[in-house]
Amino acid sequence: MFNIPNTLAFIRLLLAPVMFFLLVNRDSSILSSIHYSWLDYMAAFIFVVASATDFFDGYIARTFNQVTTLGKILDPLADKMLTLAGFLGLMMLDRASSWAIFIILTRELFITGLRVSAVSQGLDISASWMGKVKTVVQMIAIGFLLMKWQGGEVILWIAVALTIYSGYEYVRDFFKNSTID
């Protein structure tokens, strides 16, 4: 149950709120002596480490046949927590469009509900190739926006488009294979 991939996903679960704290509690007494740019660097570092755990937990689980039911739950939850922490933090810092974040989060909630319904019907809930591309582009957008690099907003809107399209794929495949009328 607590193999390396699950441990990495759990670490990602723990890093997400730390990153969020660094982004939204800049004026707290704990962080008030640290310059904002260093808080950005720390948040970006945490984000990169957490994102790397996403790659390695999946790679290790598949390569060494360590896929578990717990991992199938923890991995997408950790992904959602990490992107939620990044996007909400960036929105609160006024570095990301609230509309883009609204669209992304609405899709994530909807697809999570769809996945629950799929599981109840015994359907495959694995992430599609496009879903994985969407996650990578979202993570790149978060990284660019955290570091205030040029093109971050453009990458964010590309992530929105991929998010909508991959959501469409989930819905299409769900209804093609579902017993729901």
Image: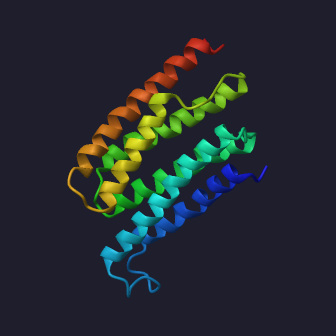
Q: Nearer the viewer, residue 175 or 6?
A: 6
Q: Nearer the viewer, residue 54 or 90?
A: 54
In percent of width and height, residue 164 lies at 39, 31
Residue at screen point 72% across, 38% down? 65
Q: How is the image coloured?
A: rainbow
In percent of width and height, residue 133 lies at 42, 35
- Left/right placement of residue 105 relative to residue 74 reads left
Residue at screen point 35% across, 40% down? 159
Kindly indicate the quadrant of the structure image that contains residue 8. Answer: bottom right
Residue at screen point 33% across, 61% down? 146
Is 181 located above or below residue 3 in the figure? above
Q: Nearer the viewer, residue 72 or 119?
A: 72
In percent of width and height, residue 123 lies at 67, 22
Picture mark count: 0
Direction front: furthest residue:
63
- Left/right placement of residue 126 relative to residue 109 reads right
* Quadrant of the snapshot with the C terminus: top right
Direction right: furthest residue:
1
In percent of width and height, residue 95 lies at 28, 58
Residue at screen point 46% across, 51% down? 83
